[in-house]
Every structure is written in C-alpha cells, then in structure tokens.
Amino acid sequence: MMNSSGAAVVARGLTVVRGDRTVLSGLDFTVWPGRITGLLGPSGCGKSTLMRALVGTQARVTGTLEVLGRPAGDASLRSRIGYVTQAPSVYDDLTVRQNLDYFASVLLPGRRRAEIRRQHITRVIEDVDLASHADALAGRLSGGQRSRVSLAVALLGTPELLVLDEPTVGLDPVLRRDLWNLFHRLADERGTTILVSSHVMDEAERCHRLLLMREGELLAEDTPDALRARTRSETVEQAFLHLVDQADAAARNSSRDAAADPDPFQENHR
Ligand SMILES: Nc1ncnc2c1ncn2[C@@H]1O[C@H](COP(=O)(O)OP(=O)(O)OP(=O)(O)O)[C@@H](O)[C@H]1O
C-alpha cells in the first residue's frame, strides 16, 4: 500500500532536533516505489538521522513523514520495512545460518512454518552470496561478510521498503558491484523500494534517483542524468559541488542584503 499519490515515502517540512541542534531542517522529498533512491551527502549531514526518522526510531521528529501510506513509526510498518544500520546486528557466537534461523523464528514463529523459514533462509543466503560461509561463526567473518549477514536478516521478511545505511562501507570493489547488482535485482524483479545512503559519490551513478544533502538540508532531488544536465557537470560529484557553491553564494547574498537593508522597525526606534 502506497500513499494516494503512489509514492512510497512522502516528507513535508521534516525537521529533527538532536540534543540542542536542529540536524534536519524542513526537508521536502518523495521516494518512489520500486526505485533505488540514493541519499548522498558528506559525513554528518544527517543521512542516518533521516533514515532513523523514516523507520520510526528517531525522537523529536516534526513535520509530515508518511511511509507506505502510514505515518512513520506506525506499528503496521514493522514487518514491511527492512532496515540495515551501519553497525551489523548479528550474534557473533552463532553461525550465519543460526543467526538467520533465530531472526526467522521471530518473524515467522511456529513449528508449522519451519519449512517456509528454511526456504526464506536459503533464499537470503543466496541473495547476499554467503552460501560458502553459511556454517561459519559470525564472529569469524570479515566486516563486509558480517554486514551482508545483517542485510540477509533484513531481507528475510521480503520487505516492501529496504532502508540501507551505508551498506558498502569497507567492501572491496567486487563486493560493492555485487551488492549493487543485488539492489537492482530486488528493485527490478521484486519491486522493492530501496533507500540507500552513501558518502561515496560514484555510487550515486548507480541510483535511479538521488537526494543530495548537506548540513541537514536538501540540496537537490532528481535523477543523476537530470542533475548532471542541470548543472552542466560530467559527474554527480561535480554536480554536487556546483550545488554546494550555488547554495553558499545564495546564503552570502541574502546575508549581504540583510546587512544593507536594516530592519526599519529597529531604525525607527534608535
Ligand atoms: N545524540 C546526538 N545528539 C546531538 N547531535 C547528534 C546526536 N547524534 C548525531 N548528532 C549530530 O547530528 C548530525 C547528523 O548525524 P548523522 O549521523 O545523521 O549524519 P550522517 O550523515 O549519517 O553521518 P555519517 O555519514 O558519518 O554516518 C551530526 O552533526 C551529528 O553530530
């Protein structure tokens, strides 16, 4: 079930305060179903905070945030969203298969569903290409392998929306390519909506759509092609830098205008 406009996620005026700082300020954006949307921006710009708001784990969220036709955080969304954080959430003292078995029995409890659980586990192990490590202890895996176990856990429930926080950090180029191929297969063949964050701009080129962020604000929302064309850039990285310069120049101009045009009310009372 989507929003009445057909969107998977709609944000209007999305604002988040953490501690004494506003880390997301008034974001408006849309995520379209069955597409891969890249959330790109430098470290600390608010990507994880946006994802946490979307999956309903972030406090002090204001504005409108609708996910799969429901308000973000609604209990009915829990089984429909797969969320992979930056820190792999796996039990080190269990094997890959035992980890998946444990999470599958939480999602699909009951002895009668043992066969369905087994099928789902086999599917996700193949999805993330860990068949040869299925019986290895998670604690003995490399960082990249552990994060793929986390991804496999998120895929167990065949989620409609997959929210992935920097899933390719620390992976070698071959694994990165394989993971991006998997994301495209999930979107193309299963219609999964994917929101994936990264601060590596070359990954932007692999997304259908992009949300470019900087310091808690949205610089642009578009396809990679449209962004390159609009900024006359060859790469999304150059387009991003162009948009940053443009935003800085606009901010300088508005502060210069404000200095040249003092508040008339203040003037009258001097
Ligand atoms: N608990 C907190 N209290 C106050 N500020 C916080 C808290 N957690 C994060 N922040 C700030 O919120 C901002 C956004 O952080 P967030 O983790 O969302 O950024 P990010 O873009 O995901 O960064 P990275 O790419 O490094 O993961 C940062 O400036 C961070 O310092």
Image (cartoon, rainbow, N blue to C red):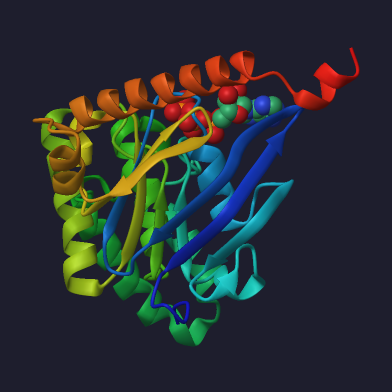
- Left or right: where 214 falls relative to 16: left
Q: Is residue 237 above or below residue 213?
A: above
Direction from residue 134 to residue 41 in the image, left or right: right
Q: Residue at x 66, y 47 (%)?
A: 58
Looking at the picture, how far across and down is residue 70, in whole percent? 58, 74
In front: 109, or 212?
212
For ligand 1, the image quadrant comes to top right
Q: Residue at x 46, y 64 (%)?
A: 9
Q: Residue furthest right?
A: 269
Quadrant where the image shows the C terminus:
top right
Q: Taking 258 as reference, is 86 above or below it?
A: below
Q: Is residue 113 above or below residue 216?
A: below
User: Where is residue 26 drawn, in percent x and y?
Assistant: 59, 45
**Quarter of the rendering occupied by the N terminus:** bottom left
Q: Nearer the viewer, residue 109 or 9?
A: 9
| Drawn side of residue 131 relative to residue 60, left or right | left
Q: Residue at x 40, y 19 (%)?
A: 249
| Residue lying farthest to the front in this orientation | 268
Whole-percent x, y for residue 156 in the image:
39, 65
Q: How many marks?
A: 0
The quadrant where residue 72 appears: bottom right
Picture quadrant of residue 262: top right
Give x and y (percent) for residue 219.
Answer: 39, 37
Give the side of residue 5 with respect to residue 237, left or right. right
Point out the residue furthest to the bottom here. Answer: 112
Q: Residue at x 60, y 52 (%)?
A: 13
Q: Is residue 121 visible?
A: yes
Q: Is residue 142 visible?
A: no
Camera-nearest residue between 149 and 155: 155
